[in-house]
Image (cartoon, rainbow, N blue to C red):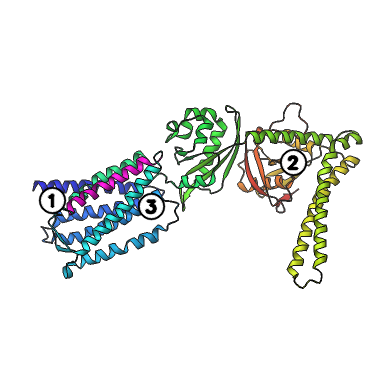
Amino acid sequence: MLASVQILSGLVISALLILALLIFMKKQTRQTNLKKSFVFTLFCLLICTSGLISQILLSKPLNISPIYFDYFVYIGTCFLPVAFLIMSLKFTKPASGVNTKKLALSLSIIPILCLIGLWTNDFHHLFYIKYSIFLSEGVYGPLFYITSLYTYSLFGIALIYLAIYSIKNIKYYFWQSLFIFIGALVPIIVNLLGVVGIFNLSIYITPMCFSITILCFALSIFKFGFLKITPIALKKIVNRISDSYIVINSDLNIIDFNEPFLKTFKLSADEIMGKSLFEIKRFSKNVPTGVKKKVEHAIQKTKSDDSTIIIDEFFESLDKYFHIEINRITEGNNFLGTLLLFKDVTQHKHDLQTIKNNQEILIERERLATLGQMIGGIAHNLKTPIMSISGAAEGILDLVNEYRESIGDPEVTIEDHKDIANDMEEWIKKIQTHLAYMSDVITTVKGKHKITANKPMHFVSSDGFDIYVGKNNIQNDELTFKTGNGNDWWFHAKQMPGSHVLLKTDGKEVPDRTFEEAASLAAYYSKGREQEKVEVDYVLKKEVKKPAGAKPGFVVYYTNYSMVADTDISKIKQL
């Protein structure tokens, strides 16, 4: 009697632990496929345990043979290895491309057939010849051995996957894999020892061992973050990245990184793994306060937005410029974490600044007082378009010769003629672009117009916000430093000459659509207007500075956002 009470207590403890973990899992808001397979594994464990509790409590009072309770227990027993194998695959091979739903259905065929064989055992005794609650005293039919062999095989495969994965990824996922491995292995070994008769164990001992299983699972989940993120992030990063990166979860805790990140910010792995991003002193000390706020805002935005968020920043303590890309990591529709890529663009920024300085010098030369000075300043500016036009002329001449040779050729189709015509049209468009540039230069040289600080172009966004576009350097200067307020937004085409664009906010929150329209104006009124898309920098006006002694229109800015804008401005209203 005492032994029966002890067994019942052990089973109840196991059932309560499984139930508690199930309730916790169901309350999680983000249900990934890994979590779903883990919940199904727990559910199978609960079926086994609750069925044996019912057998102890109800078999004698209701005069029901214990074997009939096993009919229910075996529902969990047969599907448990399938669930555990799928969970192991989800954890160790998330990017393998295997359709786990189809695999689970295929693996369930044998368990279903074995269950049918068990439920009809009274007619053929192919599963149990003699049933006993003691594993070594039962006499088993061929179906029992088929079921056992299949169960042990699936568990074995799953454990091999976990063992191999924990060894390969010992730096990041060793403890998660180890505790799942131990938790599954303990009841399997105990059950196997009873079945082969090494120890005279009852059928209740295996479910009682589930207590150890659940404790191991709990350690893996709560201590080592087994379900917070899967190696999906690692697989994606390996395929995409060549610079520093970190992966963080929704609590801003770092869960993955690479060696370049540690070297760039002079950190150690133990110092950052599992820590909150901005609570790491050495990292936080190197990151400007404004950058922290932008990154935190971007991370929150990635939870609901699939777009890439770009932040260009100057880290003064490191004397480096970084191009930061922030992306969400998902599995299906489920948010798993955020990927931050840090690209060191310091040399690129210095090179760009040199180019801008040279461009400003050339622009100023255009405004020299005499024709001789202006010719000296712009002579090499004309050389590039002239050479381009010469090359285009040669391209058109080749097409003309090709067309002449095709006349009368029966193998040349109408489509071939259209292709030749299209190629000619493309070359002509390129010539027209260069001629337009040369015309502007020549007009300046002849003094036909004078650059003045007239009113800039005025547009109104779809949401009613005023947007101003400078038409020359003097207007750009006036617009940026006299018209604009600190909290207005300033736009400029990235890495190419273009107009300054000012979006007046009047202290209001600006909708995304207005941001996009202002960026489109900056894209259109730039050297890239012939392109379909142009990357545009935008920043609060107060972040735009004019170096001492700089010429009109020359600015610098070290902190900015970027977006890719359409050059079509036909729907934006101009006053």
Residues 159 and 84: in front is 159
Q: Residues within 10 Å of mark 1 (few under 14, many from 20)?
A: some
Chain part drawn in magenta: 172-195
Is 193 in the magenta?
yes
Going by the image, does 281 lie left or right of 179?
right
Image-quadrant location for residue 545: top right
Q: Give the CA separation, mark 2 to mark 3.
A: 53 Å
Q: Residue at x 25, y 64 (%)?
A: 114
Q: Disc 2 vs disc 1: Cβ atoms closer than 8 Å?
A: no
Residue corresponding to mark 2: 497
In depth, the one of 305 and 280 nearer the eye is 280
Disc 2 vs disc 1: which is toward the camera?
A: 1
Q: CA distance from mark 2 to mark 1?
A: 86 Å
Amino acid under label 3?
Leu
Q: Residue at x 73, y 40 (%)?
A: 500
Instruction: Identify the element where label 3 is drawn.
Output: helix
Residue 89: mark in rendering: 3
